Amino acid sequence: MSDERTTGIGRRAILAAAAAGPLMTQAARAAAPRAGRSTQGTVAGRRRLGSLEVSSIGLGVQNNRRKYTTETPYRPEQVALIRTAFDHGVTFFDCAEAYGPHECERILGEAIQPFRDRVVITSKFGWNIDQQTGERRPGLNSRPDHIKLVVDNMLRRLRTDRIDLLYQHRVDPDVPIEEVAGAVQDLMRQGKVRHWGLSEMGLNTLRRAHAALPVTAVQNEYSMLWRGPEAEVLPLCEQLGIGFVPWSPLGAQFLTGWIDANTRFAPGDIRAVEGRFTPENLPHNLQLVAVLTQWAARKAAAPAQIALAWLMAQKPWIVPIPGTTNATHMLQNIGASSVHFSGSELVDLNAQVRAIEVRGQRLPDAVLVHSGREAPLAARK
């Protein structure tokens, strides 16, 4: 049993203090155990992604089949974790065909059976994945006939008759977005899909997609560790009335304080091939953890809660979806919905975060190449 369960002191907060080292003030270090006794309980409030209402914080289930560190979590515990999240007010669960592949949809489908009609579930299509074996094949596939086949299989794995929010996981460079929208619209007419969205798309593709079929939400990476959407994506979402769902809102565990300057990642862990986590860049980037730890002490919260509350404070239509395989961490994460900043506090925190220029690339080249892509124009008839 973890220290968090036996003492009530958040291990994340203690490790954040160690990670910050000399960057952390004595007062913040002394307050770290107090910060660990962070807000936990039921999700506070609800938010809207377009016309879709969800809990103010969701739960991502990507790692419920395979952790960053490559271990396979115990499946019954993951089913229980999802059900516990619902018991504590989470009504927004994020999944994808590619997670597993397929297996995370099965876990989510099993977990939500007792309360399916009381939650919002998402999934994503777009990678070229064999529908029978789950084999990952090269490239992307958003051909309309393939989308419809994928959705039928998603419904079976998720044990449901509809997907509340269906995303294109990445833009297919060979399929016009209007054709993708047409396929999704057909699925909506059949009652199999309620809303749709895009992830990591180019700006013009988002405009075209929204013109063809109103988009409910965009899902891009966004956190204190990666603030790229602030420049253009968030303003466009605001202009078009589209909600925003940050994936990796805790920076692949970095913003929880579990990673320090001596951390190294094993083969198979994606963080091992991300530039921001290299031995050369980690010490510099840990300045963010120092800021988080100081604010955690100030707000009697955990560093992860400050990171999530900061995201939610940026716009009222931002809904983070932190993932975890640990029920204690899940309860801590959703407690971020009760952490608030005054206007002056947010100005101060924003200034501190944006003064730190994060070093290192956020994703390996082979993955990053699929972000910001524009869909081709439809051929003229």
Image (tube, grey):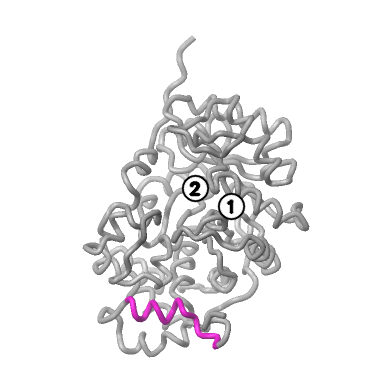
Q: Are marks 2 and 1 in contact (CB under 8 Å)?
A: yes
Is residue 314 something that shows in the picture?
Answer: no
Q: Quadrant of residue 74?
A: bottom right
**Residue 113 lies within the magenta run:** no
Precedes in sequence: disc 2 or disc 1: 1
Which x, y percent locates residue 36?
48, 82
Residue 257: where, in percent of width, then height? Answer: 40, 73
Q: Position of residue 299 (x, y in %)?
A: 46, 80
The quarter of the rendered structure image containing the N terminus is bottom right
* Residue occupying the point 64% across, 36% down: 151
Which residues lie in the magenta part?
7-19
Residue ID at (40%, 37%): 202
Residue nearest the viewer, comparing 154 with 71? 71
Q: Residue furthest left?
A: 280
In magenta segment, residue 13: yes
Within 10 angstroms of label 1, few (less than 14), some, or many (20 or more) residues?
Answer: many
Dot 1 lies on which element?
strand
Q: Residue at x 69, y 40 (%)?
A: 155
The residue type indicated by label 2 comes to Gln
| Residue in the picture at 44% in, 63% down | 250
Residue position for label 2: 219
* Above or below for 43 versus 61: below
Residue under pointer 1: 94
Magenta segment main secondary structure? helix
Q: Is residue 247 left or right of residue 193?
A: left
Does the image show residue 45?
Answer: yes
- Which amino acid type corresponds to the residue marked 1 in the rendered image? Asp
Q: Position of residue 72 (x, y in %)?
A: 54, 59
- Residue 123 is labelled as none
| C-alpha span from label 2 to label 1 | 10 Å
Q: Nearer the viewer, mark 2 or mark 1?
A: 1
